[in-house]
Amino acid sequence: MKMKKTLLFLTSFLFLSSLLLAQMPGQEPMGRQRMRENINRLRLLRMTEVLELTEEQTAKIFPASYQIEKEKIDIIKTLNREIRELKALLGGANPKEEEIAAKVKTVKELRTNLLEKDQEFEILLEKNLTEIQKAKYVIFSIEFYRNLGEKLNRAKVMSKEKREF
Amino acid sequence: MICQKYEKWISDALDGALSERKKRNLNSHLTDCSDCHAYQESLSRIQAEALRLDKAKVSPSYWENFSASLKKRLQALEPEREAPRALRLSWKWAWAGAPVFLALGISLVFLLNRGQAPENDIFSYEACLSRLHLEIGDDAKLEDNFNHVILGSLRGGLDSAALEERYLFSEDPFFWESLNEEELEFIEQEIKKEMKS
């Protein structure tokens, strides 16, 4: 009963968060960003089922996860812009080494920031999960990532079939 | 260093204790090295002179004493003589073993690194997404199809949860507590729009 309630809570939370994101000016969830958001939603949904998260846990974990993802998207946007600028610098007639070095440093820092956000979520889980749930999360992560790979393979087959058709 | 080796061989050759192969090697060296050639000639001369000497008349008891004292001296010298030999041997082994140790070291570093990388990869969400992005690349069609597959799974999960029980999330205090100002404002606007229509 509690599990069902939690899942429904998640359903409504994900639905509302996606609506909200869609409404934000200048932040249209397109392409890769939309894919990231959907993967994160699926991750939270499966995590709730597998880890049997309680309502209290979901109330702490979901909003934080959503916030972390939003911050990650901002980092990725900046990272992409910096990489584009780095490419432009390298492609220029007289690339200045100091400028390139500074850009490389920024790119590396952003990459670290992105990984730190991942770590932030892990710490959040560490604080809010029971020992059994932590163990389940380890197994869940491996299986979820593998499952994503399988989904990508399915998508590849779909693309191939469409091309052949 | 090379001549030292040949000097020993010259002595062995005069005693008749040198193999045919070494003898050939020594002879070719003697044609090139005047020092060794001179050494060989002087040794040959000494040996020839020694053979011409009359044998000394010595009693058997003298030889017994001589053997005993020689043995004693050799035993006393043994550790000193053995040490450099052991050292030489250990250096030989060290040179022979160096490539093996190097190969083992490289393998160990490789194995340790190989052991760490997948572990980091397996547990990192961002690394997993990066892998997916890399595989998808610029293929918009594949990205779209992948997104469809993800949405399918997402919809399946959400539908099954919704079908199991009709539940009013709005009645759940945790739901409202988890929303921030922005989200609450959005819901309020949507409700107002609904009420107007």
Image: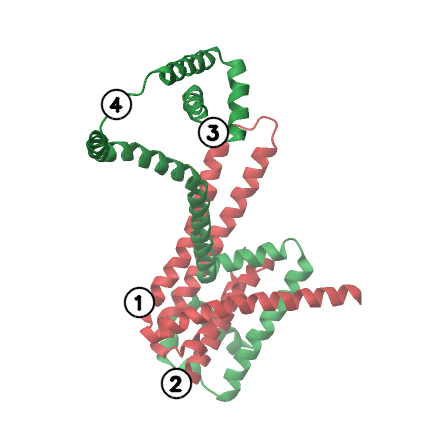
Chain colours: A red, B green
On residue B18, the disc is 3
Which residue occupies the foreground of this view, B111 or A122? B111
Structural crowding at the residue carrying mark 2, measured as other residues with C-alpha within 10 Å and reported as few (<14), some (14–19) or many (≥20): few
Residue beneath the point at 57% across and 42% down: A84
Pointers 3 and 2 within a single chain: no
The crowding category of the residue bearing disc 3, from other C-alpha atoms within 10 Å (few below 14, some 14 to 19, many at least 20), is: some
Sooner in the amino-acid sequence: mark 3 or mark 4: 3
Q: Measure how far apart labels 3 and 4 are at the Cα level.
A: 31 Å
Callout 3 amino acid: Leu
Q: Which labelled disc corresponds to residue B57?
A: 4
SS of the residue under disc 2: helix
> Can the viewer see residue A130 in this picture?
no
Classify mark 1: helix, strand or loop.
helix
Tell me what residue is drawn at x 40 percent, y 36 percent: B92
Q: Quadrant of residue B77?
A: top left
Q: Chain of mark 2?
A: A
**A88 vs B114, nearest the viewer:** B114
On residue A127, the disc is 1
